[in-house]
Amino acid sequence: MTNKENYIRQETVTGVVPMLKKDRQYSFLDLFLSTSGFAIATWCYTQGAYVAQYLSFSRMLINIFCFNIVWVLIECLPVIFASRYGIDLWIWLRSVLGKKGVAILSTVISVANFGWYAVAAGLFSSSMINLAGKFGIVLDKDLWGPILGCLCVVLGTLIALGGPNVIKWTNRFLVTALLAVGIVVVVLCFTSVPFADILAVQPDLGEMTPLQAFMVSAEGNVAFAFSWSTQALVLPRLSKTERGGYWGTSLAYGVVAPFFVAAGGVMALAMFVRTGVYESDPTTMLSTLCGSGFALLSLLLVAFANVGTQGTGSYVNCMIVKSGMPKVSYKVLVLIAMVYVSALTVWGGVEEHFGTFISIAAFIQAPIIGMIVVDYLLVKKRKISLKAAYFIEGHDAYQFTNGFNLVGLACVVIACVVTILFVYNPLTGEIQSPLFLIFTGSGFDAIFGGLLYWIASLTPLKKYMLRDRDDLEIV
């Protein structure tokens, strides 16, 4: 077996194992571009349009950048450990949730995360239908939408099966091109309609107060930031340095992604000025606002960006599931994901309930984010037993209670239930408490989950939570 074949086998087929420094292939730029390729999928434009319908131009920019940057910088702190030891942070979570706890929650979270790729597939089909229209070919959206969406999923699956090296080179081209397109799109939006008209747009808030509207948008942005978190914990293990791992991840999710969300918001406001409708489909916005030549190029890049996103997303989420079920074949997981995302794409319901979807996905992940940051900094203080994390014989500190860390799992459940019942219900969009106007629903969920976990570590439960202190040979 060649070195390349051995590398891909180790990374994607054999299972989640620590990456030795000599095997790590991602520089800061490689990780930044690969992560950015994941972060700047055209769902950013959908997110931007969602925020724009609640806020004026200046408030929209403040909301998008402030909430994303702050939460991403915090949630990515444990990435330093992942880069140092070349491990997936879901391996760390075995010490927080237990072996079986990770298996269950990693699967549930990935099932939720894959909804994003149905959105990307839908946008791919819209791009291709619009491209065909530019050449005078009229395609029935009801017929061709699902077919082209499934084609996007299949093409992304092929990239995922190629492993991280294929993903790296795919994103090197796509991200560079899309960054340029994003900058030009923003400029064109400001020139396609008078800038004063964009500034003059005031949202129709109905019965909501301006503060409620601002925090509902903030909830969308915090949920958006959290949606990266469990996926952001995978790629940094490929980084050659800790600094490159942290900043390559943080800048992609905290700066590049919000920039494209803001671009989507600007496009939505420009579309409202032009047509009177807040449009969330970037392909429609590009066709309407940009000149025909640039629109053609943009639609093409947008279309194939979603293919790259499918590939990266399939790889990352299947590795998340694999961290909980290491004996399952990576290829089998990728193929199962292909069928699942294709079914979501044909259904089309994720896009119709976008705000609810991102909050539900974030509510599951939020307490885990809070707990892993607290565990990393305050409870285990950046030290775990790698032998116990990989269940080497004789090292069973993380078996806990039949594979479940009851304390960690209780913190997740309590945080979610309390948030939904007393702070914010993502299913109905109902604000339950003034606490929402301070923390947002997802933010409260994360803070409360971390606080519960920290308080538990101050009680006699600490002995149960820190069963690994006599097994820290690698620190």
Image (tube, helix red, strand yellow):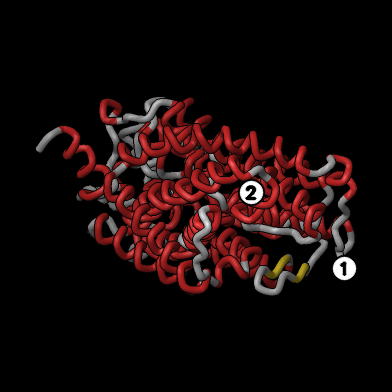
Quarter of the image for residue 89 reads top left
Residue 206 has which mark? 1
Answer left or right for 327 relative to 418. Answer: left
> Which residue is at a point 9% across and 38% down the rendered structure image?
1
> Which residue is at a point 47% across and 46% down the rendered structure image?
305
**Residue 364, horizontal then vertical, whole percent:** 55, 62
Closer to us: 326 or 414: 326
Give above or below for 90 relative to 4. Answer: below
Answer left or right for 362 relative to 48. Answer: left
Mark 2 or mark 1: name the one nearer the start of the chain. Answer: 1
> Disc 1 on helix, strand or loop?
loop
Closer to us: 335 or 112: 335
Answer left or right for 469 relative to 20. Answer: right
- Please say whether residue 400 is visible from this viewpoint: no
Which residue is tagged 2? 286
- Please say whether residue 177 is visible from this viewpoint: yes
> Which residue is at a point 65% across and 39% down the rendered structure image?
185
Crowding near pointer 2: few (<14 within 10 Å), some, many (20+)? Answer: many
Give above or below for 339 relative to 9. Answer: below
What is the distance, in whole Å, between disc 2 and disc 1 at their CAs?
A: 29 Å
Residue 263 has which mark? none
Crowding near pointer 1: few (<14 within 10 Å), some, many (20+)? Answer: few
Quarter of the image for residue 427 reads bottom right
> Which residue is at a point 44% across and 60% down the rendered structure image?
110
**Residue 44, horizontal then vertical, whole percent:** 60, 49
> Disc 2 on helix, strand or loop?
helix
The residue type indicated by label 2 comes to: Leu
Give above or below for 373 relative to 121. Answer: above
Q: Mark 2 or mark 1, which is nearer to you?
A: 2
Closer to us: 247 or 49: 49
The residue type indicated by label 1 comes to: Gly
